Structures are given as C-alpha cells and as structure tokens.
Image (cartoon, rainbow, N blue to C red):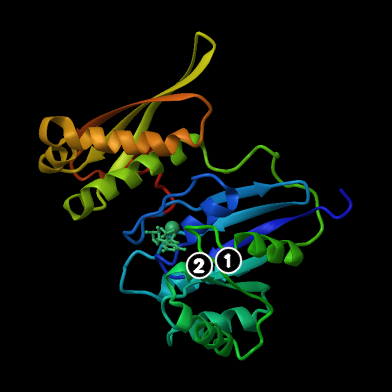
C-alpha cells in the first residue's frame, strides 16, 4: 500500500469527442451513456477504476446543450469547475480534426491555473497514417511545446488506453482508495439503468423522438431461481405526445421490442446472471415543464 495512488480525474472536451466512451473503456464496463447524437449525458457520472496500485475516479462532464455552441460559456464553466478540486484533467480532442481557434481558450485557462493536465487525442483510429505525425505536432504547437503529456488513444478499440492509465497514475498523488474497491459508479443504479435505456431510445428512433424522453425505473427485483440470479427490471418510457408514443411502440410493438433488446444487452454487462426487462410507454404532456416531474425523473440539477 506504500505507493498506492488515488485521485479525481475530470474529462473535459467538446461534445462528441468521446469522453463517455473513453471512461467506459478505461473502467472496463459500460457505465455512461454514449451516442452518435451529441449532448446526451445529462448527469455528471463518475466511473471508478480500482486495481492493486491505484484508484482513479473519472468524472464525466455533462454535454453542452447547444450543439453549435461548441466552446461556449457552458464548456468554459465546466472547465472552471473541473479545475477546482481535481487532481488531474484529461483534455480530450477528436484527433480527426486539427485544433481550432477556440481550443486556445481552454488551453489558456488550464495553463494560467497551473492545473495538471494530459492532452488526449481520441479517435486515433480515424486518423490516416500519413496525417498522424503532423497531427501530433499541431497539438503540440497549440500548447507551445509546454506539454507535460500527450497521448493518442482510441476509446473504441482501446488503443493507447494502458499507456494513458500509466500517465494518469504518474500524475496522481499518493493516497488510499477513496471508494470501496468493488464500486464502479457513484450514481444510484436507477440512474444508470434509465440512462442506458434512454440511450437506446435515442439510438433507435433518431430524430423522430426529440430529447423529450425520460425513463423511470419503476421496480428492480433480484430473484433466485434454481440457483440462478435473475434481475427483473420494470421501466416506463415517458414521452410528451401521443404521436411519440406511437413511434416508440412501433408497428406491432417492433420498435419497443428492439429498444428493449438492445437495452438489455447493455444492462447485462452490469449484473451477474440473467436480465428481464419490461418496458412501458406513457404520455405525460409537458413533463419537462413540471418541476416535480424533473425531480422524479432524476434531472433536478441539470435543467
Ligand atoms: P462525448 O459527448 O464526448 O461523451 O462523446 P461519446 O462518448 O458519446 O462519443 C461520441 C461518438 O464518438 C460515439 O458515436 C462514439 O462511438 C464515437 N467514438 C468515441 N470514441 C471513439 C474512437 O476512439 N474512435 C471512433 N472511431 N469513434 C469513437
Ligand atoms: Mg458524454
């Protein structure tokens, strides 16, 4: 335990650069919501990686609400609050693109505050071989060669992730584990489950169903049948209009079935044994305008 290290690491970056995917990969479980549609992370989730040498607590910053407002106020606000009180910041970039004008903003913020940070070039799998050398140099230039550390990774394939964990460990202070060793998320399981189901609703319905969907976990039951573990989950998908309910259910229930099946696949990774998942759809007009509903569906912090 002498050289045990532990600390908080915030992931910071524009929407869609792969922050949530990277946390999932680093922690080794599917715990946060990822999606090709930007801004789906509503709650601040922590993912915890514990092993014999260190405990790293990753903090996923919620997305910026307006997709075009890329480096707007909210991201800067996130950056400012991320700087306070964490041990290290991972500044995540989509390395398909060279650094843009706005990126200098965040760089200055971090450098002026003397925050410890690692630059992570994610989606390295998508950068063509011939462009790779140049791309690294472009990011080094952004930091005027003042960089402590830069790591290329692919959150999808896991490329570079072990190296990144080593870099993180180096930067963390010596200390005891801060959370129980078997804990991988600090959110209640209800929140995780509803986020996983909501993710599948968004993925399966695309633009037809806007972000007016909430998922409420009604019941979780742990059953033991003939020595086998079964987790039975009952959830309601809430929409605002009747027409949305129709889309969600689909022809002969086909859409709801597809959503249920893919949700179950993801939920399976979190539990031992078999998962039963039953989904219902309910219309609550204007639920987003009702504060009591927001609290009921777990969004009290974010609207
Ligand atoms: P976030 O908004 O920063 O949390 O981004 P997400 O983790 O939700 O990822 C956004 C999209 O990028 C998803 O479709 C991911 O599958 C995809 N993605 C994330 N990391 C990688 C990567 O390393 N390579 C590729 N090809 N796609 C990635
Ligand atoms: Mg995210």
**Image position of 141 with respect to 123: above or below:** below
Question: Can you tell me which quadrant of the image ligand 1 is in?
Answer: bottom left
Question: Extreme top residue here?
Answer: 226
**In the image, which disc is placed on residue 172?**
none
Looking at the rendered structure, the secondary structure element under dot 2 is helix
For the residues labelled 1 and 2, the Cα–Cα distance comes to: 6 Å
Inspect this view and state whether residue 85 appears.
no
Quadrant housing residue 7: bottom right
Q: Quadrant of the C terminus?
A: bottom left
Residue drawn at 70 percent across, 40 percent down: 181
**Image position of 56 with respect to 73: above or below:** above
- Residue 289 or residue 197, whichever sits in front: 197
- At label 1, counting other C-alpha atoms closer than 10 Å, the crowd grade (few under 14, some 14-19, many 20 or more) is many
- Residue 73 or residue 45, whichever sits in front: 45
Residue drawn at 31 percent across, 68 percent down: 66
Inspect this view and state whether residue 174 appears.
yes
**Image position of 76 with respect to 48: above or below:** below
- Would you say 17 lies left or right of 197 here? right
Which residue is labeled 2 in the image? 78
Looking at the rendered structure, the secondary structure element under dot 1 is helix
Residue drawn at 65 percent across, 82 percent down: 147
Relative image position of residue 171 (x, y in whole percent): 74, 67
Relative image position of residue 209 (x, y in whole percent): 20, 49
- At label 2, counting other C-alpha atoms closer than 10 Å, the crowd grade (few under 14, some 14-19, many 20 or more) is some
Relative image position of residue 264 (x, y in whole percent): 38, 33
- Would you say 249 lies left or right of 156 here? left
Asked if the residues shown at circle 1 and circle 2 are in contact, with their CB atoms under 8 angstroms apart, the answer is yes
Q: Give the mark count.
A: 2
Which residue is labeled 1 in the image? 82
Question: Extreme front residue here?
Answer: 130
- Residue at disc 1, CB closer than 8 Å to ligand 1: no
Relative image position of residue 95 (x, y in whole percent): 46, 75
């Amino acid at each position: 335990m002498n050289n045990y290290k532990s600390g908080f690491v915030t992931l910071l970056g524009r929407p869609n650069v792969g922050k949530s995917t990277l946390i999932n990969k680093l922690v080794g479980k599917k715990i946060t919501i990822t999606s090709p549609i930007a801004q789906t992370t509503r709650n601040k989730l922590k993912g915890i990686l514990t092993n014999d040498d260190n405990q790293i607590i990753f903090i996923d910053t919620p997305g910026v609400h307006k997709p075009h407002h890329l480096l707007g106020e909210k991201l800067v606000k996130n950056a400012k609050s991320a700087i306070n009180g964490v041990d290290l910041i991972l500044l995540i970039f989509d390395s398909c693109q060279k650094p843009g004008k706005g990126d200098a903003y965040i760089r200055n913020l971090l450098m002026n505050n003397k925050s410890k940070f690692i630059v992570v070039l994610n989606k390295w799998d998508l950068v063509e071989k011939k462009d790779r050398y140049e791309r690294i140099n472009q990011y080094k230039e952004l930091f005027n060669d003042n960089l402590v550390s830069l790591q290329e990774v692919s959150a999808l394939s896991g490329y570079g992730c072990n190296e990144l964990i080593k870099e993180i460990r180096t930067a963390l202070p010596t200390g005891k584990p801060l959370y129980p060793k078997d804990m991988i998320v600090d959110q209640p399981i209800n929140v995780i489950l509803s986020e996983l189901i909501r993710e599948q609703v968004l993925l399966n319905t695309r633009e037809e169903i806007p972000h007016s969907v909430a998922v409420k976990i009604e019941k979780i039951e742990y059953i033991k049948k003939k020595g086998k573990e079964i987790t039975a989950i009952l959830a309601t998908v809430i929409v605002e209009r009747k027409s949305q309910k129709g889309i969600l259910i689909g022809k002969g229930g086909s859409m709801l079935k597809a959503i249920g099946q893919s949700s179950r696949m993801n939920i399976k990774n979190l539990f031992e044994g078999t998962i039963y998942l039953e989904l219902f759809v309910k219309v609550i007009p204007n639920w987003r305008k009702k504060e009591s509903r927001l609290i009921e569906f777990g969004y009290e912090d974010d609207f």
